[in-house]
Image (cartoon, grey):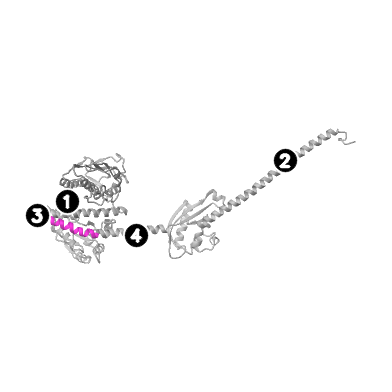
């Protein structure tokens, strides 16, 4: 039987062949497209591989640059606290030839050759703390290079890891960063040394200046109590005013130096505010009358009798502001007002740090002086600034008073500000937190009148004869005949033989100073262990009061010594039965 195609029409055969050829061509195109896609994929993969290789190389290069040039020491530990990476500077400090020398080692293995056992233990403890809590910070002097010169490092340990670390083949780890702060620390030490030297210099200068001032003011006050004619009385008054002006300048400079050093103390105690204001009025009313000015004092009924605060600093602020009003007011009057108001009644910067304030004490000093230009108000509370120096060339002062007052107000949690109209006058406003006194002051506690104490037995110790003379003359006004000692050794000898009621002890003396002398007297025990020993000091720098209390003194009197202060001291420390009023 012939094939089926043999009887097929030739045209049909041609059509069949064309159909099959078309199918074959379509399959060839599909195959070709597939291979082209495969080729493109291979090319893309190769390109990606080259890009990744380049990126990895660049990343490694940057990582190497970071490890080589980073100024800080950085170490990366795995979760077993084994080193896996570090900056190149560590290799140099440890004398390691390459990273392989330290790789996979722990803290103890890495640092055993250069750090103490305690240093290594501290580092390990910090690493454990970081793993447990995420972060630890320590500061240490370390000598990695064993040159004998330690460097000061701030060392921060931080836990790392999470999903990123897990993808990289570890769960957690620790990064330790050692920041060299030696230069900063040494600069801080130099600054502290300079501050200490400045404070020491000021303490010495305070002593050297106040010692003769003690004699000038003391002898002046003694002479003022003697029989004098009117001319002599005026001369003594002029001497006292000049000495007080000089003393004010000295105090301003010393106060400002303490403020700048951050060592000015605000001492909180209970005091009679109304008595303070009465004393200010009595003192300034005389001065204002002498200048043909009127001083009006208005004390609000809400102003409390007793408050808790720094009496001396409050007096200093108000005295300075009243003195300025007196200086710069040439005609008219000055109005002083004091009142109480709620804590949030006005918009300034009064602070109630411990929540003990029950309100705000306000003081306004309004004058009819020349006033202050708007452009000058910013200078007013800056140190060493004086306004209209030509017009005010006859006014004595350092330009520190208001700067000190402003900072004192801020230290006390209060504020000081000004409203002024040039040519018409100014109003200085003070606000401080009102803290109620723990106990109300009684009339008996305020008694400061003169008295006699002829039976009192006192010892005065000072290496400067004129100071002994001044103090002895002041005590004679109270009927007291004191024993005098010009050295610490003489004082120890007298204290061992006599039961004194009070010992007045000079601070700075040659051979044996007041502190060493006091320690020797206290060591005798018995009466010497409890006898009041009062420091006589011209050193009002750096918290001298606290320093004396820590060295077994009972109190202190600052030079120059005044009758009022020695009166108060004798009342406080003499046995009551030896005080004869009148």
- Which of pointers 2 and 1 indicates the residue nearer the eye? 2
Q: How far apart are marks 4 and 1 (CA)?
A: 44 Å
Residue 333 lies in what quarter of the image? top left
Residue 78 in magenta stretch: no
**Exactly how many numbered labels are in the figure?**
4
Magenta region: which residues? 207-227
How crowded is the residue under tag 1: few (<14 C-alpha within 10 Å), some, or many (20+)? few
Q: Earlier in the sequence, mark 4 or mark 2?
A: 2
Q: Is residue 95 visible?
A: yes
Which residue corresponds to mark 1? 448
Q: Of 212 and 235, which appears nearest the observer?
A: 235
Q: Distance between the residues labelled 4 and 2?
A: 88 Å
Picture coordinates of residue 147, whole percent (x, y): 45, 65
Q: Which of marks 2 and 3 is nearer the N terminus?
A: 2
Q: Earlier in the sequence, mark 2 or mark 1?
A: 2
- Which of pointers 3 and 4 indicates the residue nearer the eye? 3
Which residue corresponds to mark 2? 30
Q: Of 431 and 295, which appears nearest the observer?
A: 295
Q: How far apart are marks 1 and 3 (CA)?
A: 28 Å
Is label 4 in a helix, a strand or a loop? Answer: helix
Is label 3 in a helix, a strand or a loop? Answer: loop
Q: Is residue 415 visible?
A: no
Which residue corresponds to mark 4? 193
């Amino acid at each position: 039987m012939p094939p089926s195609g043999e009887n097929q029409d030739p045209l049909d055969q041609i059509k069949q062949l064309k159909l099959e050829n078309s199918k074959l061509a379509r399959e060839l195109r599909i195959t070709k497209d597939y291979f082209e896609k495969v080729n493109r994929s291979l090319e893309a993969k190769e390109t990606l591989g080259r890009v990744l290789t380049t990126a990895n190389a660049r990343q490694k290069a940057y990582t190497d640059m970071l490890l080589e040039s980073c100024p800080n020491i950085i170490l990366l530990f795995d979760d077993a606290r084994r080193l896996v990476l570090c900056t190149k500077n560590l290799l140099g400090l440890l004398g390691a030839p390459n990273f392989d020398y330290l790789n996979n080692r722990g803290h103890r293995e890495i640092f055993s050759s250069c750090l103490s056992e305690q240093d290594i233990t501290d580092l390990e403890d910090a690493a454990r703390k970081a793993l447990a809590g995420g972060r630890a910070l320590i500061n240490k002097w370390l000598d990695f290079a064993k040159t004998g010169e330690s460097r000061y490092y701030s060392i921060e340990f931080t836990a790392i890891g999470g999903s990123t670390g897990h993808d990289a083949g570890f769960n957690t780890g620790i990064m330790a960063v050692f920041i060299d702060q030696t230069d900063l620390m040494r600069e801080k030490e130099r600054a502290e040394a300079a501050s200490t030297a400045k404070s020491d210099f000021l303490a010495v200068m305070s002593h050297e200046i106040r010692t003769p001032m003690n004699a000038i003011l003391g002898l002046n006050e003694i002479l003022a109590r003697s029989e004098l004619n009117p001319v002599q009385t005026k001369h003594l008054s002029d001497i006292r005013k000049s000495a007080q002006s000089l003393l004010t300048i000295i105090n301003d400079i010393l106060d400002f130096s303490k403020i700048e050093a951050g060592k000015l103390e605000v001492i909180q105690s209970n005091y009679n505010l109304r008595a303070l204001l009465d004393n200010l009025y009595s003192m300034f009313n005389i001065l204002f009358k002498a200048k043909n000015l009127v001083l009006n004092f208005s004390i609000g009924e809400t102003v409390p009798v007793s408050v808790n605060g720094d009496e001396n600093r409050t007096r200093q602020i108000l005295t300075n502001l009243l003195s300025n009003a007196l200086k710069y007011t040439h005609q008219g009057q000055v109005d002083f007002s004091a009142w109480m108001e709620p804590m949030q009644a006005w918009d300034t910067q009064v602070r109630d740090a411990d929540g003990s304030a029950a309100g705000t004490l306000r003081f306004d000093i309004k004058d009819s002086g020349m006033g202050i230009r708007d452009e000058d108000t910013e200078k007013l509370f800056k140190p060493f600034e004086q306004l209209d120096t030509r017009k005010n060339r006859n006014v004595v002062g350092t330009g520190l008073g208001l700067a000190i007052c402003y900072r004192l107000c801020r230290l006390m949690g209060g504020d000081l500000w000004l409203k002024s109209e040039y040519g018409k006058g100014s109003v200085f406003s003070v606000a401080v937190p009102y803290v109620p006194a723990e106990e109300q002051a009684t009339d008996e506690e305020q008694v400061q009148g003169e008295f006699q104490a002829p039976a009192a037995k006192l010892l005065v110790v000072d290496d400067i004869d004129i100071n002994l003379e001044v103090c002895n003359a002041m005590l004679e006004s109270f009927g007291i005949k004191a024993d005098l000692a010009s050295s610490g050794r003489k004082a120890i000898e007298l204290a061992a033989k006599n039961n004194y009621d009070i010992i007045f002890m000079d601070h700075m003396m040659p051979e044996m100073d007041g502190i060493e002398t006091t320690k020797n007297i206290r060591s005798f025990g018995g009466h010497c262990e409890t006898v009041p020993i009062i420091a006589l000091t011209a050193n009002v720098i750096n918290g001298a009061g606290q320093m004396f209390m820590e060295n077994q003194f009972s109190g202190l009197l600052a030079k120059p010594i005044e009758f009022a202060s020695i009166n108060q001291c004798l009342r406080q420390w003499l046995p009551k039965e030896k005080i004869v009023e009148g």
